Each structure stands twice: as C-alpha cells, then as structure tokens.
Image: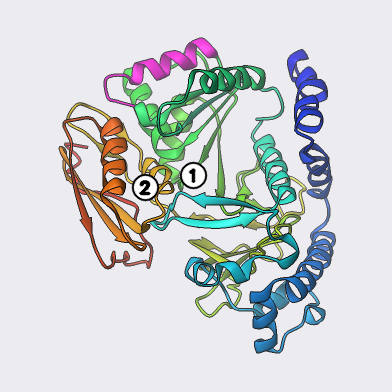
Amino acid sequence: MSTYERLFSTVLYPAYESGLRRRKTLAYLAQYEAQQWLSPEALRKLQTERLRALLEHCQTQVPYWRRRFRELGFSWQDLRGPEDLAHLPVTGKDEIRAHYDEMIAENWRGRTTRKTTGGSTGQPFSFEYTRESYERRMAVMLRGYGWAGAGFGVKRLDLWGTDLGLPSWSQRTKAKLFDAVLRRRVLSSFAMRRDNLHEYAAEIESYKPQVIVGYTSPLETLAEWILHNGPLKWRPASVITAAEMLSERQRATIEQAFGAPVFHTYGCREFMLIGAECEQHRGYHASDDHLVVEVADDAGRAVESGVGNVVITDLHNWGMPFLRYANGDLAQAGSAHERCTCGRGLRLFGPVEGRRLDVLRTPDGRILPGEFFPHLMKELASVDRFQVRQKQLDRFEILVVPHGEFTAADEAFLREHVGRVAGSMVQLELRLVDDIPLTASGKRRVTVSELPESVS
C-alpha cells in the first residue's frame, strides 16, 4: 500500500464519508469484509436471521406484503431458511408499478429516496430506498471492487457515461476536486469516435492508472484499437468491466490489449453490486450477507443446475422492500456445494445472460455505446419501454411505448440529447408503438445494430 493509499483510507475518506457526510459506509464495509470469510453455513444462518426480521417488518409495516402474506396463508414465522422464500411469488417491475404506494413501508413514508433506473432491458423504472440501504450498497460495491485491486486511494481511470446536459462551472469544479482526491480520472464513453481513440490511449499512458473501470463495449472498442495500432507502454494492474455482459472473446481482447486481468462485475441500479469476480475468476460471488440471490425457473422454483431467472431479495431496504424481485436477467445456477478456492464463503453463480447493448455508429466515426440510451431514458417518465435500432449508418429508429402522454417536449428532449451525442449526420426516426417484441430468449434488446460487419 502506497503512502497516499494509506492516507486516503485512514484519514481523507473517513473524514469525508463518516465526518462530513455522516454516513456509516465504512462501518458497514468493515462488517462485510469480515463476513465474506464466514463459512457457507454461517452465512446461511446470517441470511436467515436477516430474512426473518425483514419479513416480520413486511408483514407489519408494508401494506402490499401484509395483504399478500394473508392471501397466501404465510407468516414470517414460517421461514426456517432462505429456501422458504419459494413460498412467496416472484415480483417484477410491472407488479411494483401497479402497487407502488402499497409497496412503501408505513413507518418509512416521507423518509425514503426515489431513484430511477436507466432501463437496461428497455423499461425505465422507479423505486424507493433508505439511507442505510444506500450506505450498505456502497460498502458492498467497495468490497467487490477491492477484489480487483481497486481499493482506497488506488489510482483509477473510468471509461464511463457522463451526465446529460451542460454542468455549471461550480459543478465541474466540484467534480474535478472530488476526482482528484479519489485519484480518479473519468473519460466519457459517449464521446468516443474512430478518429479520437488515440486520445483515450494517450490519457492512459499519461495518467498511468493502476485500475481501469468501464462499460464493456467501449473498453472492447478501445482494446481493439490498441491491438491494431500498437501496444500501450503503461500496463494497469487490472481492468474492471461493468454495466453490460462480458463474453470470453471480449475478455480475451481486453486482457491482451491492456496486459492485465479482467474482473467482471454484475449488478443493477435496484441493488447496485449483486456479484463480482474474485482473483480465481470462477464466476460471481453472490453478496450473500447483503442480498439473497436466487436462480429460479418461471414458476419461481430454485434451479439446481442450468439457466434460470435472477431473483433478488434485498435484506436492508426496509423503505420499499424488494422480495423475490426478478430483474429480467438469466443466469447459470451455481452448485450448492461448490466453494471457491479463494476461501470466501459467498456462493458462486453465473455466468449471467443479461443485457446485450449493441454499439451504434455514425457516418462521422462516432461510436455510441448502447448504455447511453438507458442513461437518457431514465429522465423521461413518459417512456414505458423503448428500443433503438440501426439499419443504416445515418439513421436511428427509436421505438417508444408511452407511459401516459408522450409530449412534444419529450420528443424535443430526446432529439436534442441524442443529436448532441450522435451528431447532425444522423437522422432520428421516432415511432410510438403499442409493444416491442421480445427476442427468442424472452429478453428485450435495448439497442439493436443491424449494420453489416464491413460498416460497423
């Protein structure tokens, strides 16, 4: 550990997080760091205790679950272990939307924070969460990133999405100061073009990050450029991929280009980090001390082997409890008896067959990651579902299933922000539709590129 890393972890970050912001993130991180080494049996006991407390809270304080428990003849006292969650129905976005107010705990009304997801399956979604839930999510993410070497004060470069709109001078100054203290440099993945990829490579050479973090597709695009144009002189210690799935081909390309191992993370905005790879790269370690991660069939029964639906129960969001929530992804179930050689007791699962976000391209060489559109659509409450298709280099077709009235102002917002990123050479065809067909696997594709390989 360098001098700065030691200073950051013991003085600077505690002063900011615990002192200035009065958050308990670091205390929770210490808990999670210790709990990861518990045996699977001890983690199961911990999960059961937290589940029983959560279900008692749902039965007494959450109108929706109080009613559903009564209809099912179920009581929190019936739960003997995480497997008993199978007595409860699987819920999804549509169910939560339909009963939103009923889902909020009576003793938490007025004290929760609302968050909107970007709709990585083509369906923007809002939910409520508590301050403790946020602090615990941050702690779990810090733990998972730490497995990849991205600990406190480690020099890091992020190839990530940037905020929409034009931030003020004070916002830009605050962000620069915060990033400087964190030893983090952020490059916009939304600004990538075929003719400026050398600038991204030059930033890596000059900044010399120990860890690179980014969306999978932009990292793959940059990696392919590096392999074609010559090796980097600087090699990070690791690369963390996120927000999209990672194929073995993409992993090999990124590792070859950056000369560093790739650690993939899996999560969604409803819970943040769900699972992450450790040093052994044998799958995702589930956050068993924070969530209950199930792989279930369409009837809600546990899948012993093979692929099933990812179903999550959040043990700590008591403001709007998520019980058996299907986030729309499919995953390979892990063996109940398999334990990672790293020594952590956290269960293994995966790989995940989740979000496929095709990269879109423009005539003037811009490379637009599919993650841009969920980032954009979360700003519009009038969008129920969406999909972006590209059949020609100079045209994007945006399909929108409206939620209520989709106004002229909403259309102007979309055209302005897509135009700002895609440029004036791309025509936008916006179509309001009643439905968007699923893929053969039952998934919604957010971005679909049908360009020939010779063009894309």
Q: Position of residue 394 (x, y in %)?
A: 15, 37
Distance between the alpha carbons at the discs numbered 1 and 2? 9 Å
Disc 1 on helix, strand or loop? loop
Magenta stretch: give its range: 192-207
Q: Verify whether residue 196 appears in magenta.
A: yes
Please report the residue visible at 36 percent of the width from the left and 24 percent of the height from the top.
227
Q: Verify whether residue 323 appears in magenta.
A: no
Please report the residue visible at 65 percent of the width from the left and 88 percent of the height from the top.
71
Which residue matches tag 2? 357
The dot on residue 243 is 1
Quarter in which the N terminus is drawn:
top right
Q: Look at the magenta stretch and give its main secondary structure.
A: helix
Tell whether 308 sits left or right of 363. Answer: right
Q: Amino acid at mark 1?
A: Ala
Q: Quadrant of residue 372?
A: top left
Q: Amino acid at mark 2?
A: Leu
Q: Quadrant of residue 128?
A: bottom right
Tell whether 3 sits left or right of 88. Answer: right
